[in-house]
Amino acid sequence: MLTLQQASRFIFRLLFWVPVIFFSLLLVRNTILYYSFSQTFSFIEERAILFAKPLYYWSFYLHIGAGMFCICAALLQFSTSIIKKRRKIHVWSGKIYVFVVLLIGAPTGLYMSFFAKGSFWERGLFLFMALYWFFTTWWGLKTIKEKNVVAHKIWMIRSYSMAMTAVTFRIYHLVFYVLDWGHLENYEISLWISVLGNMLVAEYFIYKQSKRYLNSFTI
């Protein structure tokens, strides 16, 4: 029989992972639609001048493809059963994730940040996101090469927190849309809460895991 603490932990994980998985798969589904290369999507229509430039055009499609893969990889990488029983899946999906982030996702995100919707501050936030995503992933790679598994987990949690902003942004955006917030206000606040919120949640998970790791050495 489950104890009260085990039951509460199970419920918390359920409430956390069910919406994350649902919105991740929904985002993947919506992203795939862009590969019809139709010009009728509102995002593309709003930026018709930018999409006329080949560099921006291909950066966009490479970026959303990289993001779609990274979101799926994140769900695999955080599966305890895969880490323990299917280690090769964890290793190879991790290698591909790092390659995609460092060579495609972060560089295209950095370029596109200069043309992002919103004010100077929102463009600056997108710039920060691209750099933060790149360097946390780089340190995740560096630490695992040094066989520092604990540090590797810490840096990869931070890296995935940035990859998942695409998911959490849409959750907040939907909530504020239901609350009838203005479009631009909704966009800007959803973006800031998503980025800062994901970073805080990542640091909370790191704190909890570090505490659990240190407690394992106590008698």
Image (spheres, rainbow, N blue to C red):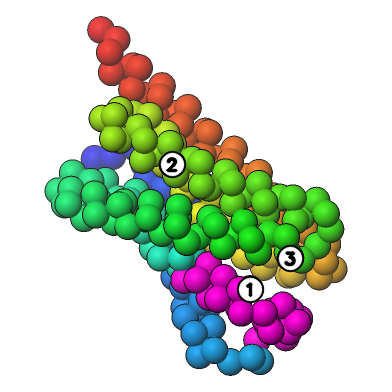
Q: Are marks 1 and 3 in contact (CB under 8 Å)?
A: yes
Image quadrant holding the C terminus, namely top left
Task: Give the secondary structure at mark 3.
Answer: loop
Examine the structure image and report whether residue 61 is included in the region drawn in magenta.
yes
Residue 80, percent from left and from top: 26, 46
Q: Is residue 51 left or right of residue 15?
A: right
Q: Residue at 26% across / 30% down in the picture? A: 147
Residue type, label 3: Phe
Amino acid at pointer 1: Tyr
Residue located at (35% from left, 32% from top)? 143
Q: Main secondary structure of the magenta part?
A: helix
Residue 122 in the magenta stretch? The answer is: no
Looking at the image, the residue that sits furthest to the left is 85
Which quadrant is home to the N terminus? top left
In the image as oriented, which residue stretches furthest toward the top? 219
According to the picture, the residue beneath numbered tag 1 turns out to be 56
Q: Which residue is mark 2?
A: 138
- Which residue is drawn at the image coordinates 49% and 85% (left, top)? 35
Give the spatial CA distance, label 2 vs label 3: 25 Å
**Which range is magenta?**
41-65
In-image side of 105 versus 128 (left or right): left
147 and 55: which one is in front? 55
